Every structure is written in C-alpha cells, then in structure tokens.
Image (tube, rainbow, N blue to C red):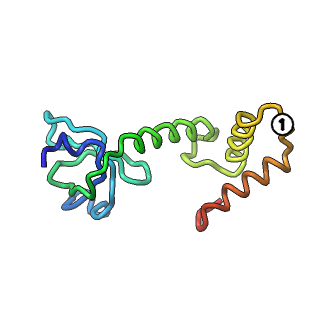
Amino acid sequence: MDPYALVNRRVRLVGLTSRPKDNGKTAICEAYDAERPYGLTVRIHGGEQVRVRPANVELVDGANYASELEQRLVLTKIFSAYDHDFSGEIDPNEFTVLVRDLCKVAAPNADWTDEVVGAFAAAIAGAFPGEDR
C-alpha cells in the first residue's frame, strides 16, 4: 500500500524488532516522510508517537481518522494545561479544577459550589471503571 494512503488511518504495528512490545498495538498514522527510512509517524493508542517503516504496519480498516486525531490533539492540549505538577497525569485535584472550569463555561451564571462540582467530577470519573482515580 502507498505509505501516503496510510495517513489518518488506523494501523496495527507488526514486525518491530527494536520495540517488540509494541507489536500488535493499534495506532493512527499521522504523517509520512519519504526522505526518512522510518518515515511513517504513528501515534500509539495511549499517546506515544513513534516513527516506523511502512512495512511495519498493517491497515486495520479503511476509515479516515483525521477528525479523531484532531480531537485527541485538542484534548491533549486541554489536559496538559491542567497538569499543574507536570506529572503527565491529571490528579484528582487537577481534575476537579478542570470540571469546575467546564461547569463555568456550560453555565456561567450558576452557583458552582464545591459539593456540586465534586459530584460532577465523581460522576465523570465513575464513567471510567477500572481507571485509577
């Protein structure tokens, strides 16, 4: 398959010798640079960006994930802005600040008490079972 046709497509990583733990993982292809031997830039689900050879990917489906990729990049920027301790993760206090700001955007004239914001934060976090909170 033409490597340029892989951009914005979901692929599975295969045959990686320097990163065997990533074999079988799915990723979104972000770019292709024909001038580089490892010219395909992919973002593994979970956020890590790596460069691989086109031979090291298999097309998972034909859907175009450009909008999904753009949404993930926007979310990454938003979450980075709330990662005040630069840990790479949003801790419960940072998450509550994010939820409070979202509430203020949704209803700027409402009285967003700590109890209400805490309830919203707990409800959102509860929607992701098995995640560390």
The secondary element bearing badge 1 is classed as loop
Residue 64 versus residue 19 in the image, above or below: above
Query: x, y (%) of residue 60?
Result: 27, 58
Query: x, y (%) of residue 105?
Result: 71, 33
Query: x, y (%) of residue 49?
Result: 35, 45
Q: Amino acid at mark 1?
A: Ala
The image quarter containing residue 34 is top left
Looking at this view, is 80 or 101 the one in front? 101
Query: What is the crowding at mark 1: few (fewer than 14 residues within 10 Å), some, or many (at least 20)?
Result: few
Residue 42 versus residue 107 in the image, above or below: below
The residue at 26%/52% (across/down) is: 62
Q: In the displayed structure, does residue 111 sit left or right of residue 11?
A: right
Query: x, y (%) of residue 66?
Result: 36, 40
The residue at 14%/53% (across/down) is: 55
Q: In the displayed structure, does residue 85 sit left or right of residue 50?
A: right
Q: In the displayed structure, does residue 91 sit left or right of residue 20?
A: right
Residue located beneath label 1 in the image: 110
The residue at 65%/59% (across/down) is: 133
The residue at 86%/38% (across/down) is: 111
- Number of numbered discs: 1
Q: In the displayed structure, does residue 67 sit left or right of residue 42?
A: right
Looking at this view, is 103 or 47 the one in front? 103
The image quarter containing residue 58 is bottom left
